[in-house]
Image (cartoon, grey):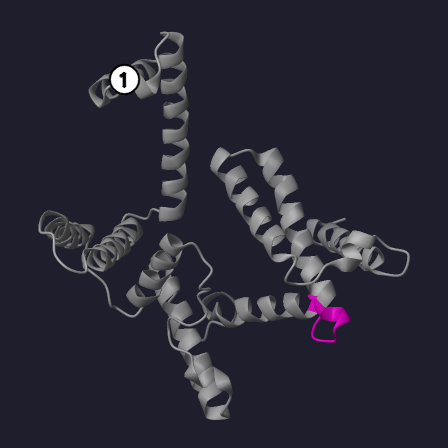
Amino acid sequence: MSDASHAAQEFTRLVEIMSTLRGPGGCPWDREQTIDTLKPFVLEETYEVLEAIDRHDHAALCEELGDFVFEAVFVAQLESEAGRFSIADSLKSVADKLVRRHPHVFARAAGDAALATAGQVRTRWEEVKAQERASAQADGTPAAAKSLLSGLAPTLPALLRAYHISTRAASVGFDWSGAGDVLHKMQEEVDELRDVVETPGPGDHARAEEEMGDLLFTIANLSRKLGIEPETALRKANDKFTRRFGALEQSVAASGRAMKDMTLDDLEAEWQRLKASRHAE
């Protein structure tokens, strides 16, 4: 049996299991769920997939991807019961979209140049999306009002959304020429934020919030220029700080001291000592 046939077999089994769970004599908990009550589970599974990827824990990733797919099947089952669409409709939609937005793979016309880089592919992807919007406009459908930045979920983590916004803008040439230019812009935003902090005045909080937002948006742009996904980078930084702070707590406790009784200089000195010892390992 081919991998595709095996996947189809197991996917069909999952859909049938989900239908049974929701059917007469099925699971009371599953039968009570709505698309709204499932939202936290969808989000939780998304982050568990990301955590497994960050750890490169492939066994865990295998399991978490299964849970992630299950949530999609669960939501689609509820929509199917309401007569809106089925999981098959969702699969057809994404498959059609992939074929349509990869003409360089599936429908390359004679004489068309091959796309050799990811950047060229991204540009072509946005061109096809623009053609889709133009077709929708010709048909008079509501999709005509969509812009290049439409379709980015407002519920995305803000840093990740900033990354995707800048990626889409860059696909049509609205971008800095290099990472160095973004660094200059970042310094400009830091200076503007410093001015708010060091020169108190009315409306300071609102001004500081705006300048901080501008700085974070610029940082997301720098991440993109460096080929770094900022949400992943920040998660790793959070994990690193958490590990080091835990080590700091243990070290201080082992010395018989209490962190609240130590000066900032003392804590910083111990922090640097722990960092140096870990680098030496």
Question: Residue visible at 34% across and 46% down?
Answer: 228
Residue found at the very far right of the displayed protein: 25
Residue 117 seen in the figure: no
Residue 82 counted in the magenta span = yes
Q: Position of residue 183 (x, y in %)?
A: 17, 49
Give the residue type at disc 1: Met
Q: Nearer the viewer, residue 167 or 77?
A: 77
Query: Image check: 278 left or right of 153?
Result: left
Residue 171 drawn above or below residue 192 = below
* Direction top: furthest residue: 255
- In the image, residue 227 lies at what x, y percent? 32, 48
Taking depth in this image into account, of 280 and 196 the one nearest to the observer is 196
Q: Residue at x 51, y 44 (%)?
A: 50
**Could you tell me how many numbered marks the image carries?**
1
Q: Position of residue 102 (x, y in %)?
A: 48, 67
Residue 263 among those drawn in magenta: no
Could you say which is closer to the camera, residue 125 or residue 222?
Answer: 222
Q: Is residue 202 visible?
A: yes
Please state if 197 lies on the left or on the right of 76 as rendered.
left
Query: How far across and down, in percent of the image, does residue 46 sit?
Result: 55, 49
Q: Which residues are magenta?
A: 79-88
Q: Is residue 268 above or below residue 62?
A: above
Q: Dot 1, crowdedness within 10 Å: few (<14), some or many (≥20)?
A: few
**Tag 1's secondary structure?**
loop
**Would you say 144 lies left or right of 98 here?**
left
Q: Image point 25% across, 56% down: which residue? A: 209
- Toward which corner of the image does residue 52 lie, by quadrant? top right
Position above or below: 57 against 94:
above
Q: Examine the rendered structure and indicate whether residue 125 appears above or below residue 242.
A: below
**Between 202 and 277, which is closer to the camera in this rendering?**
202
Name the residue beneath numbered marker 1: 262
Q: Quadrant location of the C terminus?
A: top left
